[in-house]
Image (cartoon, coloured by chain):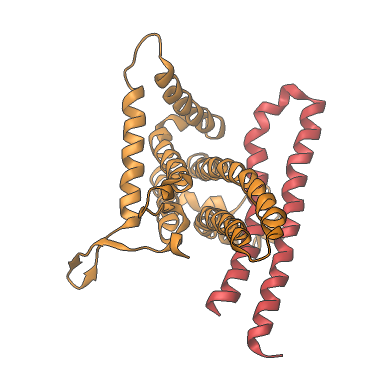
Amino acid sequence: MKQFQVDPIVDLQLLGYDISFTNSALFMLLVLFALWVFMLGGMKRELVPGRWQMAVESVTGFVQNMLSSSIGPEGKKYVPFVFSLFMFILFANFMGMMPFGIIPGVHPFTVTSHLSITAVLAVMSFSIVLIVGFWKHGLHFFSLFVPQGTPWWLMWLIPLVELFSFLVRPFSLALRLFVAMTAGHVLMKVLAGFVINGLNAEAFWVAGVVSIPSFILMIGITMLELLVCAIQAYVFALLTSLYINDAVNLH
Amino acid sequence: MDAESAKLIGAGLAAIGAGLAAGGVGNVFGSFLQGALRNPEAADSQQGRLFIGFAAAELLGLLAFVVAMILIFVV
């Protein structure tokens, strides 16, 4: 599908590798720019916050609450990381839902609908967990795989199961975000196809029977998709903070 | 049956998983609402757990979608 294609805008080669500036990179820069503008407007530190500052403060407060409730007082250290992760995913998801397509020649692109990008985000949060865990606890970190109160005759099984559930974390993180965004966009593409094909059909009644109900359904699905965008960003940040909690506090 | 049609039937069967995950997600939110209406004061503190349950239930449905996509486009 056209909306998932990564097209080079500026062709670049380095040592035989293709490092072209693609539409994916362009939309990541757009997300970064939107994020920068959003933060810049809210970081005035006025005593009586205006509307914009209120919006920024409520988001930072939200992330801080999430971290302090899942990690505890030590969670404050991880606010910058989780906040940037959350905001980047949220803005990237929303950027893909924006109707840029009404400008001729412009194709919107959802950065998070590619496994390579969500995988990098997931590996980042997974490596933070590993680094924090080994930094704070050293080799004692491996006690994460032996929950307290494990009976001795299950010692051969429980660590294996725990190790496996620990190792699939980055995959589940990356896959969830990627598939949720891709599936939502495919669904909307299918419904949009119903609308257009119904209008172009030879029989005149098809437009009324197929196109109009599909269009109404599509409005609803778009709302749902916006909700999913926010929920997926929230779930990613929440799971990251839970995993960091495992590394900071062990079990 | 040739491999092409078996592939498509398998992808269709994978869609059952999406429906089951819908049941799971509904169960998560429904149970949360049931508990929250009985004890509204404790509801806000459990919102994180609500979304963990939602994420776990949803992931399995999304895996069904991945299986379908792999069957159609990759295999």
Residue A150 visible in the shown view: no
Count of numbered circles on the image: 0
In the rendered view of the protein, which quadrant contains the C terminus of chain A? top right
A5 or B21, which is in the foreground? Answer: A5
Q: Classify residue A22 as left or right of residue A181.
A: left
Which colour is chain A painted?
A: orange
Q: Residue furthest left?
A: A15
Q: Position of residue B6 (x, y in %)?
A: 68, 83
Q: Residue furthest top?
A: A48
Q: Position of residue B31 (x, y in %)?
A: 79, 39
Which colour is chain B painted?
A: red
Q: Quadrant of residue B70?
A: bottom right
The answer to whether A212 is drawn above or below residue A197 in the figure is above
A131 or A147, which is in the foreground? Answer: A131
Q: Position of residue A68 (x, y in %)?
A: 51, 29
Q: Position of residue A135 (x, y in %)?
A: 38, 45
Q: Classify residue A24 as left or right of residue A227.
A: left
